[in-house]
Image: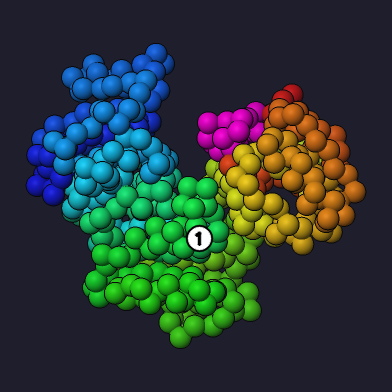
Amino acid sequence: MIMNSSYANKKILVLGLAKSGYAVAKLLKKINCEVKVVDSNPLEGNTEAQALIDEGFEVITGSNDASLIDDSYDFLVKNPGIPYSNDLIQQAEKLNIPIVTEPEIAYSCSDATMVAVTGTNGKTTVTTLIQLMLDHAPQFKKSYYAGNIGIPISDVIQKATKDDVVVTELSSFQLEGTIELHPHVAVLNNIYSAHLDFHKTRQNYINAKMHITKNQTPDDYFIVNWNEKEWQDLAKRSKAAIIPFSDQQELGFGAYESEGNIYYNRHLIMNIDDIKVPGEHNVQNALAAINVAKIFGVSDGDIVEVLSKFSGVKHRIQFVDRFDERKFYNDSKATNIEATIVALQAFKEPITLIAGGLDRGNGFDELVPYLKGKVHNIIVYGQTATKLIDAAEKAEIGNIIEVQDLSEAVPEAYKQSSKGDVVLLSPACASWDQFDTFEQRGDLFIDEVEKLKG
């Protein structure tokens, strides 16, 4: 860990707690910063706030009023999910106080090799696969994963040494608040339209994602999905060495899929049927991970071992159970339309789909061609139920049922499904109308499936 970070010995306000806010506050204190923490949630039940108070931190709860910051502060570290329209953030901008997120602070304090992964879909899977593969890299003592995957980078970098590697999943929310962040290897898995309620325009969203490579040099690597011309053009923004991957075309170098086989630099690695998790998207995820693994000298045999044993990430097309000749899959991490399209394409069996959640103002016409002929029953709930019903009718789904919540949806999906069906939770929406997180939503789905069996 680097103690002489550019953020050391500064006066810093941390806005918003949860895991990352708690972790970064403690890291800042460790590098001799004067830290004040502000969290809009009340103190009662706020375990992170109480723990920091017990450790002697200045913590203000139940407010994020603009008056809590003044021009004596050097930086504001914000929780990634807090919008820039927040009053306190607006005040910081008026005072010309730089606004950053937790990964920026963590990266500045780390002396480990850094690999960073972003994209609209597949980030968690790619991050996990890379970490598993780099466990076999000869030059590292240990590999870690961190970031948007659910583990604060600020915690991990305090354990990781210069002989280790940290593989970090980074969201657009996190990346927008970065200044000096400089991973040795960056991965752009894909970019679709998402989180436009936060970023306002697709271009803003893309610009936030591209922060992942803005500080890279020709000595670094930028791994890019080569399936779309837009993504190829984005690669031109980077100064790093570009290594492409594709499951749609043969490439002169990098990882690609052709006629059911995976190659790296035209050298055969494995057959795609040996990848344990289903779906074309997981072929792309594997290709991205292979590109990173090969930079660090991981052998073909170790790559094949990881891909043939990896059974998937929780909440991302996660196999839950088989019951009464039906297979149940939890894809709660599908918080946008593109992720649900990926899930629908992963299965050959008839699907009974459970969908719905937060209304971000978009329609669901993009789903129609993927629903048609594949989804036999659809159970909808939440704020978007009416819009999903409209899409289901356009897709000519014969059995459309609306329920109040997910607890009703699971037994209803079982009731409406037939033997041989896949019962799939893939909401195509954020969870925040009825849940705090997509993980909470997925865990409830798993619990309800267990109740069916019971």
Query: Is residue 237 on the magenta stretch?
Result: no
Q: How crowded is the residue under tag 1: few (<14 C-alpha within 10 Å), some, or many (20+)? A: some
Q: Residue at x 63, y 74 (%)?
A: 260
Q: Quadrant of the C terminus?
A: top right
Q: Quadrant of residue 204?
A: bottom left
Q: Quadrant of residue 328?
A: top right
Question: Is residue 107 at least partly visible in the picture?
Answer: yes
Q: Residue furthest front?
A: 94
Q: Residue furthest top?
A: 44
In the drawing, does residue 426 fall left or right of residue 202? right
Please state which of residues 367 and 257 is positioned toward the viewer in this rendering: 367
Q: Residue at x 19, y 34 (%)?
A: 70
Please state which of residues 306 and 162 is positioned toward the viewer in this rendering: 162
Q: Amino acid at mark 1?
A: Arg
* Colour setting: rainbow
Q: Position of residue 58 (x, y in %)?
A: 21, 22
Q: Position of residue 284 (x, y in %)?
A: 54, 66
In the depicted structure, whether residue 178 falls above or below residue 42: below
Q: Which residue range is magenta in the image? A: 431-447
Q: Residue at x 32, y 41 (%)?
A: 90
Question: Is residue 329 at least partly visible in the picture?
Answer: no
Residue ID for mark 1: 202
The residue tagged with tag 1: helix, strand or loop?
A: helix
Please state which of residues 109 and 306 is positioned toward the viewer in this rendering: 109
In the depicted structure, whether residue 159 falls above or below residue 373: above
In the drawing, does residue 327 fall left or right of residue 23? right
Q: Position of residue 270 (x, y in %)?
A: 54, 71
